[in-house]
Amino acid sequence: MPSPSLYEIHDPRFRSLVVGSAVLEELYSGCRWAEGPVWFDDAQQLLWSDIPNQRILRWVPDGGVSVYRYPSNFANGHTRDRQGRLISCEHGTRRVTRTEADGSITVLADSFEGKRLNSPNDVVVRSDGSIWFSDPTYGILSDYEGYKSAPEQEKRSIYRLDPVTCALTAAASDFLQPNGLAFSPGETKLYVADSGTNPDDTAPAHIRVYDVEGTHLTNSGVFCHLDEGRPDGFRLDNNGNLWTSGGHAVHCFAPDGTLLGKIRIPQGVSNLTFGGPRRNRLFITATQSVYAIYVTATGVQRP
C-alpha cells in the first residue's frame, strides 16, 4: 500500500501509478528558486535553473551536482530540440536561446513585431521542430528573477517559432499569465498553465487545453482546477495523465481532468520532469531543492 504520509489517493487509479515502497529523495539543496528541470538521457544528467542565483546546475547519478552555466541570464524553463540541443528561456535577456554542440549560444527569439518579449518562461518542442514558449511578465516584475522593466508586449502570449523560416507567431494570447506548457502524447493538444492572479486574488488556478491547428491554438477549454496552490510546470506520461506542480505537492490528473492523487513534497513545487533510463523517475524542483521519486508511469520524452 502507498505510504499515507507521502501519497494522497483521490482516485483508485492513482495506486497503479505510484510505487508504494518508493522513497522521496532530496538530490540537492541550496537554491533560491529551483526551476526548469530537463533530463538528458544520452548524457544521463539532469539540468535545472536556480533563477535568482543566475545558475544552471547539473546533477549526474553517483557524480553529484556541479555548475553547468554561470551567469545564466536568469534562465528559467528548458527543453531539448529534435537534435538534442538545449533550448532555454532567459528572463534577464528576455529571449529564447539554443546551446549548440560546441557550447556557443544562438538567439532564437527576443522580440515580436518590433518589441521586446516580456520574459520567456517555459518552452516545448514539437516533433516537426517548431518551438513553443510562454511569455508572461514574471521575469520583469522585480530585480529578483530578472531585471525590473515595463512590458513592451501588450498581451501575455504563447508563441510558436517556425523551425524553417524562424518566423514567430502568437499562437494564443488570452491569458493572465501563461506559464508551464506541454503537448499531449499525440501532440494534437497543448496544455498551458495560467498562473496569473487578479488584484483581489480571484483568478482560478487552472490548466487550460487547446487543439493545435497549424501555427495557432484553438478550442480553448479548462482541463483541470487545482485545489491548492497554482499550477506552474508540468509534464504528461505516455497514457495522457498530467503531473503538475501545485503548492507543496505534485498533482496527477487523468486525461479527463479527474484528480487521481498527489505526492506530498516538503517545499513548494515549481516544476518537474520525467527522466532516468526508463523515464519512470520523476525529478521535482521545489523552492530550494531538487527531489526525485520513482513511479510506474513512463513520461513522454522528446527526443
Image: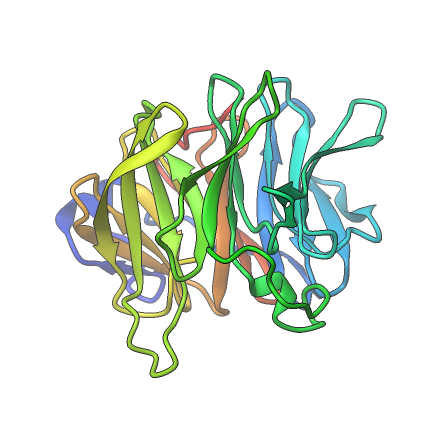
Q: Is residue 196 visible?
A: yes
Nearer to me, 113 or 126 = 113
Question: Toward which corner of the image does residue 103 lie, by quadrant?
Answer: top right
Nearer to me, 218 or 30 = 218
Please provide percent x and percent y for residue 55: 77, 54
User: Which residue lies at the image location 60% right of the left edge and 19% below the top edge?
Assistant: 165
Question: Toward which corner of the image does residue 211 lie, by quadrant?
Answer: top left
User: Which residue lies at the image location 59% right of the left edge and 42% below the top edge?
Assistant: 112
Nearer to me, 213 or 103 = 213
Please provide percent x and percent y for residue 129: 53, 20
**Which quarter of the rendered picture does the C terminus lie within?**
top right
Q: Is residue 201 above or below residue 7?
A: below
Task: Using residue 269 as the reference point, say whether residue 92 is left or right of it.
Answer: right
Q: How many marks?
A: 0
Seen from this angle, which residue lies furthest bottom?
Answer: 200
Nearer to me, 8 or 123 = 123
Question: Toward which corner of the image does residue 100 lie, by quadrant?
Answer: top right
